[in-house]
Amino acid sequence: MDKAAATVAGLNNVVRNRYEMRDIDCKRTWNFTTGFVSLVRTDTGEEMDRRPITEAERTSQRTFWEDAKPEETPEEVKEEKDDGSED
């Protein structure tokens, strides 16, 4: 009975407030060409936030590419480092 009452109370709040808070999946993308980081909803593609890339992020990206072999993609280099394997 308590569970049903809690459900009803929760639905009453949704109707009264006219909105419902939900967790949504988002993807953060670093675009080093434009110099911005974007936060995009995966369900609608809507850009939720955009900010300039920080200097620390730029430095991290440079280090990442310096470790890459010419034929590797960034994902392959990251996987190697995550596995603990050597270059």
Image (cartoon, rainbow, N blue to C red):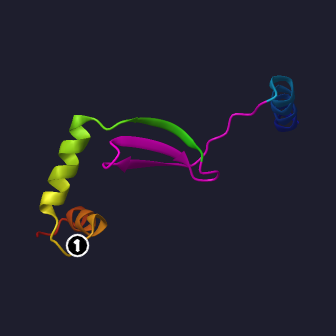
Q: Nearer the viewer, residue 60 or 82?
A: 60
Q: Amino acid at mark 1?
A: Glu
Task: Find out whether residue 79 is within the magenta segment.
Answer: no
Q: Residue furthest bottom?
A: 71
Q: Nearer the viewer, residue 81 or 7?
A: 81
- The stretch of residues the image draws in magenta is 19-45
Q: Nearer the viewer, residue 34 or 83?
A: 34
Which quadrant of the structure image shows residue 72? bottom left
Using a 10 Å C-alpha cutoff, classify the residue at mark 1 as few (fewer than 14 neighbours), some (14 to 19) or many (20 or more): few
Residue plotted at (22% across, 37% down): 56
Q: Is residue 41 above or below residue 71?
A: above
Image coordinates of residue 27 in percent, x first then y, are 48, 50
Q: Residue furthest top?
A: 16
Locate residue 59 relative to residue 44 in the image: left or right.
left
Locate residue 31 relative to residue 14 in the image: left or right.
left
The image shows a total of numbered marks equal to 1
Q: Is residue 24 above or below residue 54?
A: below
Locate residue 64 relative to residue 41 in the image: left or right.
left
Q: Check the picture and name the quadrant holding the C terminus.
A: bottom left
Task: Find out whether residue 32 is within the magenta segment.
Answer: yes
Residue plotted at (63% across, 53% down): 43
Image coordinates of residue 14 in percent, x first then y, are 81, 30
Image coordinates of residue 15 in percent, x first then y, are 86, 29
Q: Check the picture and name the quadrant holding the N terminus.
A: top right
Secondary structure under tag 1 reads loop
Q: Is residue 82 above or below residue 71?
A: above
Which quadrant of the structure image shows residue 76? bottom left
Residue plotted at (20% across, 63% down): 81
Image coordinates of residue 21 in percent, x first then y, are 69, 34
Which residue in the protein does label 1 denote? 72
